[in-house]
Amino acid sequence: MKRILTILLLTISVHMSGQKISFYKSPLDSVVMKMEEYFSGKIFFVPDTTSRARCTIRTDDESKFLLQALDILKNQGYSVTMKDGNMFILKGVGISTSLPLQYFQKSM
């Protein structure tokens, strides 16, 4: 009986430990600040100061939160670029480079 009670209490406590993430009509910079808690690298975000975009997110899983937040940002016209473990969120076209072929090759 004691063993069953222990298992029951552990099951309830594990179920209750999941954090719910909820945003209702929040500005995008608030969502990006929350994303920083769940992302291992740094997030560099340049907000569009002319836009008053708001978003709503509600989820129980942090990985789903990141995916939903990135989807909302992309739908608002932001580009998301991953570089060296960091995330860059910019309005418009993302970070890109175009170097000539064999740019880093040692000249002879």
Image: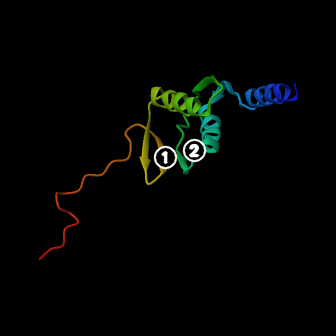
Report, in whole angstroms, how far the alpha carbon at label 2 lies from the one at label 1: 9 Å
Q: Nearer the viewer, residue 66 or 8?
A: 8
Question: Residue at image x 62%, y 29%?
Answer: 61
Q: Position of residue 2 (x, y in %)?
A: 88, 29
Residue at the location (66% across, 26% down)?
A: 60
In the rendered image, which quarter contains the C terminus?
bottom left
Task: Give SS at disc 1.
Answer: strand
Residue 49 left/right relative to 21 = left
- Circle 2 Cα neighbour tier, 10 Å, few/some/many (<14 / 14–19 / ≥20): some
Name the residue that disc number 1 marks: 87
Q: Is residue 81 above or below residue 99?
A: above
Tag 1: residue type? Met
Residue at image position (52%, 44%) is 46
Rendered image quadrant of residue 55: top right
Question: Can you tell which quarter of the image residue 105 is in?
Answer: bottom left
Q: Position of residue 53 (x, y in %)?
A: 57, 27
Q: Is 25 or 86 nearer to us in this picture?
A: 86
What colour-coding does the image apply? rainbow
**Image position of 74 (left or right of 8):** left
Which amino acid type is shown beneath numbered disc 2?
Phe
Q: In this rendering, which labeled residue sits more in front, label 2 or label 1?
A: 2
Q: Residues within 10 Å of mark 1 (few under 14, many from 20)?
A: some
Which residue position holds label 2? Answer: 39
